[in-house]
Image (cartoon, helix red, strand yellow):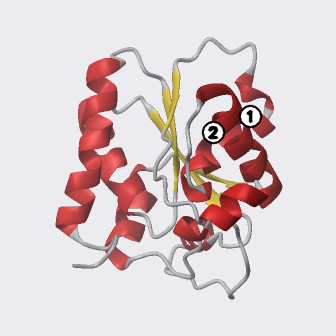
Amino acid sequence: VHAFDDPDVIAGQGTIGLELLEDLPDLDRIYLPVGGGGLAAGVAIAVKSRRPKVKIIGVESKAFPAMKESVAKGSLQSVKKGYSIADGIAVKQPGKLTYEIASKYLDDIVLIDDVSIVKTMFLLMERAKLVVEPAGAASLAYLLSNGGHAGKKDKVATILSGGNVDMYLLGQV
């Protein structure tokens, strides 16, 4: 089974979107990490099929903006190998199926840098006692580093995913 470019994986990820709508019926926007696109595709299909006005914003690493470039150029694009602390979203090329879904359902794809991700991981550990892997902290990092959309009255959710953090890396954070 492919890690992200598989209909069953995408459907499974979509359950997160259904749970968000159940828990937050007046939700306006969702920010989520994007690597290969499985999570983004699943959540976007689930949410948009029930609440088409909810905005879905994908967050990618600045070092690996493969989905953003693919959507912007209208075809699958590969990015040259770089480095990101967020290895879970450090994907050189999105999946064919996930790209097609993201192109149709994502409202925007934004980029975040590693420094912001590390600061967010630290904040989550210090204040919420949560260990979140770098890729999983990317969407909250984007919100925090861009003012958290202060002053807007939108109901916003951000998906924090994964706790796969190497102990050495955790010590460095």
Q: Residue at x 39, y 14 (%)?
A: 26
Image vertical order of residue 12 relative to residue 131, above or below: below
Q: Residue furthest left?
A: 8
Judged from the image, the secondary structure of the residue bearing numbered disc 2 is helix
Give percent across and percent down for residue 86.
63, 64
Contact check, label 2 and label 1, Cβ < 8 Å? yes
Looking at the rendered image, the quarter that the N terminus falls into is bottom left
| Residue for badge 2 | 140
Q: Residue at x 46, y 48 (%)?
A: 161
In the displayed structure, 137 sits above or below 153; it is below
Residue 39: x and y in percent read: 38, 55
At label 2, the amino acid type is Leu
For this rendering, which residue is in front, 41 or 32? 32
Q: What is the number of the mark on residue 144?
A: 1
- Give the distance between the C-alpha atoms of the residues marked 2 and 1, in whole angstroms: 6 Å
Left or right placement of residue 17 versus residue 162 in this view: left
Q: Secondary structure at mark 1?
A: helix
**77 with respect to 117 (left or right):** left
Q: In this rendering, would 103 be left or right of 171?
A: left
